[in-house]
Image (cartoon, rainbow, N blue to C red):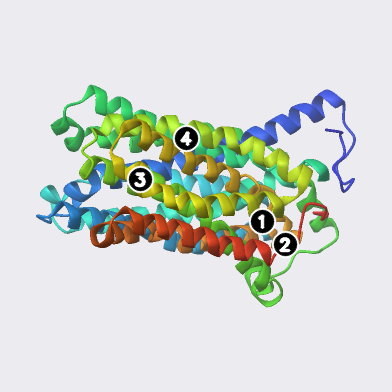
């Protein structure tokens, strides 16, 4: 990358310094989302395995699972609120400081969950505290992704925004591997009693160390060229969210709709499938977690492939193909996951997570490209997190209800319908690959 940004607002500097700066920005956008999503997936995995019995004293395992999935959904309600709050400051005072604050909120909330006593110790206060901290997780993550995507894309050359925007999109794969890998190791090394008593808390507490690393990296980066140019030209608006809804409501809604398929694919194939695999198919925890760790590797492989394709062919063509494939994948759920065969289950998880990577990768460039600089942090964050409400907040809960009443074929139909809705949103969008960000 040259020493000047595409807008020409960066001062000249030696090539080696520019390269170091570019590498630092890429790493900062990646490491933050990796840590944030590690925190989020730690809870998702715990919700599927242990949150129900520890915090909700129902006699029915199904009722416990539904209660745990309700707390899982609370964070998705909080995420748009976080995108409003952090988006405001990200568009008003800058990307860097806002990203540091969002990481702190997320990390503190996650770490404290690891210390909340269970229902047996403090009664109904336990689920109340859990819900408050889960809400805090959602607030923090609501401000994270939009800023990380902007950090990458606002530094990127115009013809490589898909590639640069891919790095924050790799964060979820790494965060998921770290989260599930740690749970996998604990499941192998601890008895069931030890895991339920204290073992599940370890991944939450480990978050404190990872957040420290992320803060160190992010404090070393500079403000993005596009935002600095907006300051110089006095383009900032007083209330970004008002400008967003007043002038850019349509791209916000279309961006949110396009995100539905990503969230549905991921949380159905991880949270719901993990719960279903352990409770109904009678896989051991460690075996199913191992299958998920294997499958998410293909999500990581699909991410750079899809990002490069989006730079070459455009965001819309890649997403259209991905959505159509996701519609078809819903029909594989009952025969593959429902078979209970290890290889068939692994194939199903691999297909779904590969398609998650295909549909998720272009979003790192697409959502920022939908908005001008003065509302970009807010707009990208709101679209991303409203998509989370629509596609993920209730997905495991609805899937559990559908599985109880109609079986896995109904859950597969839910995946197909979600993908079809995203396809309609993408078809209504304009292509954004050639748009200038400043």
In which quadrant of the rendered image does the C terminus lie? bottom right
Mark toward the start of the polypeptide (3 vs 1): 3
Element under label 3?
helix
Viewer-nearest of discs 1 and 4: 4
Viewer-nearest of discs 4 and 3: 3
Residue, disc 2: 371
Residue, disc 1: 367
Mark toward the start of the polypeptide (2 vs 4): 4
Mark 1 neighbour density, 10 Å: few (under 14) some (14–19) many (20 or more)? many
Element under label 2?
loop
Separation (CA) of disc 2 from disc 1:
8 Å
Separation (CA) of disc 2 from disc 4:
31 Å
Q: Is residue 46 above or below residue 234?
A: above
Is residue 162 found left or right of 170 in the rendered image? right
Residue 335: assigned label: 3
> Marks 3 and 4: in contact by CB < 8 Å?
no
Residue 26 horizontal/vertical position (percent)? 67, 35
> Marks 1 and 2: in contact by CB < 8 Å?
yes
Query: What residue do we see at 59% from left, 42% from top?
Result: 169
Element under label 4?
helix
In the rendered image, which quarter is residue 8 located in? top right
Is residue 95 found left or right of 157 in the rendered image? left
Is residue 61 found left or right of 285 in the rendered image? left
Residue 240 horizontal/vertical position (percent)? 66, 68
Separation (CA) of disc 1 from disc 4:
23 Å
> Marks 2 and 3: in contact by CB < 8 Å?
no
In the rendered image, which quarter is residue 191 located in? top left
Residue 288 horizontal/vertical position (percent)? 31, 34
Instruction: Name, please, the residue furthest toward the front.
Output: 335
């Amino acid at each position: 990358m040259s020493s000047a940004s595409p807008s020409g607002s960066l001062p000249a500097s030696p090539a080696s310094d520019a390269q170091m700066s570019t590498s630092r920005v890429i790493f900062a956008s990646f490491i933050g989302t990796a840590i944030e999503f590690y925190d989020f997936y730690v809870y998702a995995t715990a919700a599927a395995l242990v949150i129900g019995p520890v915090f909700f004293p129902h006699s029915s395992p199904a009722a416990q699972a539904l209660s745990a999935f309700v707390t899982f959904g609370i964070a998705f309600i909080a995420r748009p609120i976080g995108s409003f709050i952090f988006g405001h400051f990200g568009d008003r005072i800058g990307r860097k400081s806002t990203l540091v604050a969002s990481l702190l909120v997320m990390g503190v909330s996650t770490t404290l969950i690891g210390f909340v006593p269970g229902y047996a110790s403090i009664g109904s206060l336990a689920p109340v505290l859990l819900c408050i901290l889960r809400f805090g997780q959602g607030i923090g993550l609501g401000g994270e992704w939009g800023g990380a995507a902007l950090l990458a894309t606002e530094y990127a050359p115009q013809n490589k925004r898909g590639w640069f925007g891919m790095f924050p999109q790799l964060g979820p794969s790494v965060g998921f591997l770290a989260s599930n890998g740690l749970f996998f190791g604990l499941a192998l090394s601890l008895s069931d009693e030890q895991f339920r008593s204290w073992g599940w808390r370890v991944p939450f507490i480990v978050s404190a160390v990872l957040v420290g690393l992320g803060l160190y990296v992010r404090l070393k980066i500079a403000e993005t060229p596009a935002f600095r140019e907006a300051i110089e030209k006095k383009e900032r608006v007083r209330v970004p969210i008002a400008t967003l809804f007043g002038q850019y409501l349509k791209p916000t809604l279309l961006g949110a709709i396009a995100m539905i398929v990503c969230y549905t694919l991921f949380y159905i194939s991880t949270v719901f499938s993990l719960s279903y695999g352990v409770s109904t198919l009678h896989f051991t925890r460690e075996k199913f977690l191992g299958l998920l760790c294997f499958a998410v590797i293909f999500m990581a492989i699909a991410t750079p492939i899809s990002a490069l394709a989006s730079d070459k062919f455009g965001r819309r063509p890649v997403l259209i193909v991905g959505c159509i494939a996701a519609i078809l994948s819903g029909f594989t759920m009952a025969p593959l996951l429902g078979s209970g065969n290890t290889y068939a289950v692994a194939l199903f998880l691999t297909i779904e997570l590969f398609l998650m990577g295909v549909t998720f990768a272009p979003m790192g460039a697409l959502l920022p490209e939908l908005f001008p600089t003065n509302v970009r942090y807010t707009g990208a964050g709101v679209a991303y997190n409203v998509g989370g409400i629509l596609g993920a907040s209730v997905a495991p809960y609805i899937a559990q209800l559908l599985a109880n009443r109609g079986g896995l074929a109904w859950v597969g139909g839910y995946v197909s319908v979600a993908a079809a809705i995203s396809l309609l949103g993408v078809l209504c969008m304009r292509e954004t690959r050639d748009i200038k960000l400043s």
